[in-house]
């Protein structure tokens, strides 16, 4: 009976959320309904961590990693993250991604398409719980508007307190770096539950990435030292990620300069195609990237120097988090502000300056 009551409460919350979104006039009913149905299915299959850890049908490797989740959460809380009821359950999704994310961008400028939600404000992406409608909407969007469109996978997401987020099977990768990857995702999403500024996706995601990376590094190395297999695997994964970031950053900067130049549209399109082909070769992939891929990368990987300055000014992550909690929408000069270093530096002077 309590399990069923919990399901009913979750369903009522989802219906309320669906009505709010549908009433905004920003989304088609189909998108709202798939989001509500997908979230309900996820909550429906989630089981308490203890139940999963005691289930011999669950692979031992997964059970061992799930046993470490409470300690990961506690470590984050000791460093300033808000305690929540998240990650107390586990959902085996039996699919390769939690959601498929659709992003779009102008073809000759880094101007992303944005959608509006009540409460969270504008966001530069949409999430689908099934790959087919995600790809169908992406194809429709590319046909209806002159946009570069991409579909990417996401292993996790935060519901920002609407529901108690479970650990997802997609958060546990294969390989020796699984602990570091799982910890990073839990800490990243926990930052969103601690700090979230509406209509500032680049700030929110970059802050979460910065804090999760810092805490994961300390946690992995602290468990076994630099020479442990976990630390070595994590470092190798970080090195691959840094190479990816470096190549994407260089491509973004080159194309941004091209788009702002006085060259003709035809020249810009030709040079854009060549630069993106070079990016694919540098990364050793046959995938053809576009502006939507590059602008999506910028959403997650900006602001690190500013956050490092803030951390030094505040004397550590707990005080940094206390400082960013004081930020308001009015501290930013525009919605979806791409460059927010000045905002962070002003925060450092206001909240972390020595007396």
Image: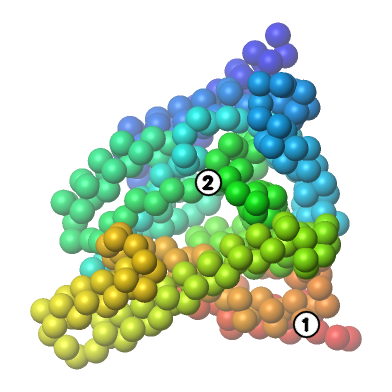
The residue that appears at 48% across and 48% down in the rendered structure is 154
Residue at point 65% right, 13% down? 4
Examine the rendering and report whether any part of residue 355 can be seen: yes
Q: CA distance from mark 1 to mark 2?
A: 33 Å
The quarter in which the C terminus is drawn is: bottom right
Residue 185 in percent (x, y) is at: 63, 52
Observer-nearest of 303 and 11:
303
> Is label 2 in a helix, a strand or a loop?
loop
Q: Which residue is mark 1?
A: 313
In the picture provided, is 64 more to the left or to the right than 268? right
Figure label count: 2
Left or right, 343 with respect to 140, comes to right
Residue 278, percent from left and from top:
29, 75
For the residues bearing labels 1 and 2, Cβ distance under 8 angstroms: no
N-term-proximal mark, 1 vs 2: 2
Residue at 47% in and 39% down: 96
Q: Residues within 10 Å of mark 2 (few under 14, many from 20)?
A: some
Which residue does the numbered mark 2 point to in the structure image? Answer: 155
């Amino acid at each position: 009976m309590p399990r069923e009551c919990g399901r009913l409460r979750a369903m009522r919350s989802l219906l309320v959320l669906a009505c709010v979104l549908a009433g905004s006039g920003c989304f088609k009913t189909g998108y709202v309904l798939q989001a509500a149905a997908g979230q309900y299915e996820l909550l429906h299959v989630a089981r308490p961590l203890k139940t999963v850890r005691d289930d011999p049908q669950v692979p031992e490797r997964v059970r061992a990693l799930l046993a470490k989740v409470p300690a990961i959460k506690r470590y984050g809380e000791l460093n300033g993250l808000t305690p929540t009821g998240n990650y107390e359950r586990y959902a085996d999704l039996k699919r390769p991604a939690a959601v498929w994310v659709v992003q779009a961008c102008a073809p000759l400028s880094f101007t992303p398409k944005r959608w509006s939600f009540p409460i969270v404000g504008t966001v530069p992406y949409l999430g689908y719980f099934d790959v087919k409608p995600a790809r169908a909407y992406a194809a429709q969007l590319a046909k209806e508007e002159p946009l570069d469109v991409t579909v990417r996978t996401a292993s996790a997401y935060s519901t920002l307190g609407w529901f108690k987020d479970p650990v997802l099977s997609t958060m546990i990768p294969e390989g020796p770096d699984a602990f570091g990857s799982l910890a990073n995702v839990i800490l990243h999403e926990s930052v969103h539950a601690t700090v979230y500024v509406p209509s500032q996706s680049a700030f929110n995601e970059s802050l979460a990435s910065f804090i999760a990376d810092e805490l994961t590094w300390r946690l992995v190395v602290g468990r076994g030292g630099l020479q442990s297999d976990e630390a070595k695997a994590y470092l190798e994964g970080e090195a691959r990620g840094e190479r990816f970031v470096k190549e994407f950053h260089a491509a973004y900067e080159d194309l941004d300069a091209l788009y702002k130049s006085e060259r003709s549209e035809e020249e810009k399109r030709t040079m854009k195609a060549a630069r993106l082909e070079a990016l694919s070769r540098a990364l050793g992939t046959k995938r053809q990237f576009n502006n939507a891929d590059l602008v999506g990368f910028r959403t997650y990987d900006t602001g690190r120097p500013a956050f490092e300055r803030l951390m030094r000014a505040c004397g550590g992550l707990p005080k940094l988090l206390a400082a960013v909690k004081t930020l308001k929408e009015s501290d930013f000069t525009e919605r979806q502000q791409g460059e927010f270093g000045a905002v962070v530096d002003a925060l450092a002077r206001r909240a972390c300056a020595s007396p």
